[in-house]
Image (cartoon, rainbow, N blue to C red):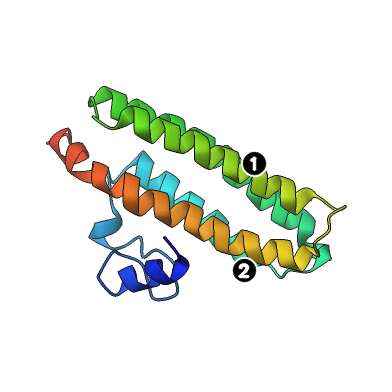
Amino acid sequence: MTMDTHREETHRGDGRSGDGRGDWRSARMVLDNGGLDADHRMQHELIRRFVALPGEEAERKPALALLNELRRVSVRHFLREERVQASMRYPHLEEHRAQHRRLATLLDDIIGQVDAEESAFEYSYVKAKADELLQFWFFDHFVKADLPMKSHLAKFAVR
């Protein structure tokens, strides 16, 4: 799925604003009104802050700090989400777990590329590509894998 496809989905009401950012007030974006949603908001905020940084060499260290925090938050989130899925016997747990591993590997690759001061590419180019990829990284997984879990979560909600 491309960023253009994501933008098109915005017009179909998937809960994101027209600039590709999530509208976390939308009921469509809420999964559990708890830890999973808080994690998603934190991941999204870290990505938003990373994207907002200029692609100047002087911003490499703050960019890496944000990416490393995103890595830490994401690992914690993936474990939380998998525990929730296991507790409700989510039928797609193994597939979801495999996606989390691929996402973590991709994030590590992005961090490595942003950290590589000795590269064939200018930092501004690497940063611009990372901006696009991180937004895709987050929204593609959220829309295709996390949102479908919503109906299963609703069955296990405390009433």
Q: Is residue 1 left or right of residue 131?
A: left
Tell us which disc is closer to us: 1 or 2.
1
Could you tell me if residue 74 is visible in this image? Answer: no
For disc 1, the marked residue is 108
Q: Position of residue 93 (x, y in %)?
A: 32, 29
Q: Position of residue 113 (x, y in %)?
A: 73, 50
Circle 1 residues within 10 Å: few <14, some 14–19, many ≥20: some
Q: Are marks 1 and 2 in contact (CB under 8 Å)?
A: no
The residue sitting at 37% across, 41% down in the picture is 36
Q: Position of residue 17 (x, y in %)?
A: 37, 72
Q: Is residue 134 left or right of residue 158?
A: right
Q: CA distance from mark 1 to mark 2?
A: 20 Å
Kindly indicate the quadrant of the structure image that contains residue 104.
top right
For residue 52, the mark is 2
Could you tell me if residue 70 is visible in this image? Answer: yes
The residue sitting at 23% across, 29% down in the picture is 91
The amino acid at mark 1 is: Asp
Q: Is residue 88 left or right of residue 49?
A: left
The residue sitting at 30% across, 56% down in the picture is 29
Kindly indicate the quadrant of the structure image that contains residue 54.
bottom right
Q: Is residue 96 left or right of residue 125?
A: left
Depth order, front residue of 148/52: 148
Q: Is residue 7 placed above or below 110 in the rendered structure?
A: below
Label 1: state its secondary structure: helix
Name which of mark 1 and mark 2 comes first in the sequence.
2
Q: Quadrant of the N terminus?
A: bottom left
The amino acid at mark 2 is: Ala
Q: Is residue 2 placed above or below 74 in the rendered structure?
A: below
